[in-house]
Image (cartoon, rainbow, N blue to C red):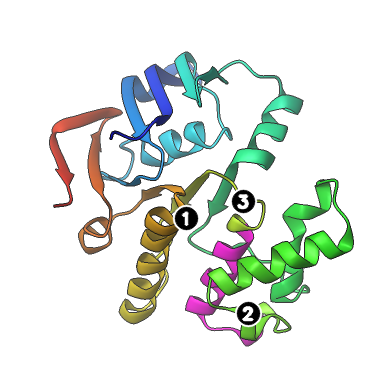
């Protein structure tokens, strides 16, 4: 039984103006991503990986084409509706964690819930569950400066999970970690897909990180090289 399509990019093009110059980080890109899939995006600097990730996450909008999410076209949502879409559907993991240094791990994970209508008890239950899933519950009262890089990234993953989004996007999530910590983070991301049916889209320069994904696609000058894609056996 095939899985449902969570995300579909249809002829997505992104155009920026730099003076009189027109820059196209993405050009007529087509892509389907299944629910529960772990997809890695690779390519040289300037290939359009992060632009594509930001469009998929609703942070940026295509200049042309459509982004379909669960069958709905979100390409032309206004700013308010796009913010709501991200809040309900997207968890974002950054390379450099982006934790608030004056907040504890618990408080950092709780932040995305403060815009949601729920009681303090409900927030606590969500935060506790997310910290447990990320295997960082024992550091809940620690500040970022008291954590290792791997532990900070686990807090960032818990923060991405806390709203229970169907999609998690990760921009070089292991780029600032040592080999052992990086491997542990990748195993965790894979578990989120296969055990919790989360969809993970990860940008990476590391071929070993990409090998952990179910499928790897390569971008070159804004175009997907489908002949060079890798599907995990």
In space, the residues marked 1 and 3 are separated at their CA atoms by 10 Å
Q: Is residue 204 above or below residue 182?
A: above
Going by the picture, which residue comes out furthest to the right? 119
Residue 216 picture location, percent across and down: 23, 45
Q: In the drawing, does residue 152 fall left or right of residue 118? A: left
Mark 1 vs 3: CB contact within 8 A: no
Residue 85 picture location, percent across and down: 66, 32
In space, the residues marked 3 and 2 are separated at their CA atoms by 17 Å
Mark 3 vs 2: CB contact within 8 A: no
Q: Is residue 129 above or below residue 118?
A: below
Q: Image quadrant of residue 46?
A: top left
Q: Give the prevailing secondary structure in the magenta stretch.
A: helix
Residue at the (67%, 40%) spot, across then down: 88
Residue at the (59%, 64%) spot, across then down: 158
Q: Is residue 101 above or below residue 96?
A: below
For disc 3, the neighbor class at 10 Å (few under 14, some 14 to 19, many from 20) is some
Mark 1 and mark 2 lie on one chain; the one further toward the N terminus is: 2
The residues colored magenta run 145-159
Which mark is drawn over residue 137?
2
In space, the residues marked 1 and 2 are separated at their CA atoms by 18 Å
Q: Which residue in the protein does label 1 denote?
A: 196
Mark 3 and mark 2 lie on one chain; the one further toward the N terminus is: 2
Residue 232 picture location, percent across and down: 17, 51
Q: Nearer the viewer, mark 1 or mark 2?
A: 1
How many badges with numbers are in the image?
3
| Front-lying residue, 71 or 160 | 71
- Disc 2 element: helix
Residue at the (53%, 78%) spot, across then down: 151
Which mark is drawn over residue 164?
3
Residue 37 picture location, percent across and down: 35, 45
């Amino acid at each position: 039984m095939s899985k449902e399509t969570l995300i579909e990019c249809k002829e997505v093009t992104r155009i920026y103006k730099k003076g009189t110059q027109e820059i196209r980080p993405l050009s007529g890109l087509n892509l389907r991503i299944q629910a529960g899939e772990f997809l890695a995006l690779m390519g040289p600097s300037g290939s359009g990986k992060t632009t594509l990730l930001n469009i998929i996450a609703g942070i940026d909008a295509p200049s042309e084409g459509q982004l379909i999410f669960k069958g709905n076209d979100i390409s032309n949502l206004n700013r308010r509706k796009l913010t709501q879409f991200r809040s309900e559907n997207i968890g974002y993991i950054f390379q450099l964690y982006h934790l608030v240094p004056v907040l504890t791990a618990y408080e950092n994970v709780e932040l995305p819930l403060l815009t949601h209508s729920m009681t303090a008890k409900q927030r606590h239950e969500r935060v506790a569950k997310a910290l447990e899933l990320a295997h960082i519950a024992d550091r809940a009262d620690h500040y970022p400066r008291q954590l290792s890089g791997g532990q900070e990234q686990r807090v960032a993953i818990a923060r991405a999970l806390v709203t229970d989004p169907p999609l998690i996007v990760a921009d070089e999530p292991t780029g600032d970690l040592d080999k052992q910590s990086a491997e542990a983070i990748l195993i965790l991301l894979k578990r989120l897909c296969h055990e919790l049916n989360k969809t993970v889209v990860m940008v990476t320069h590391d071929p070993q990180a990409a090998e952990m994904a179910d499928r790897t696609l390569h971008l070159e000058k804004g175009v997907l090289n489908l002949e060079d894609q890798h599907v995990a056996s």
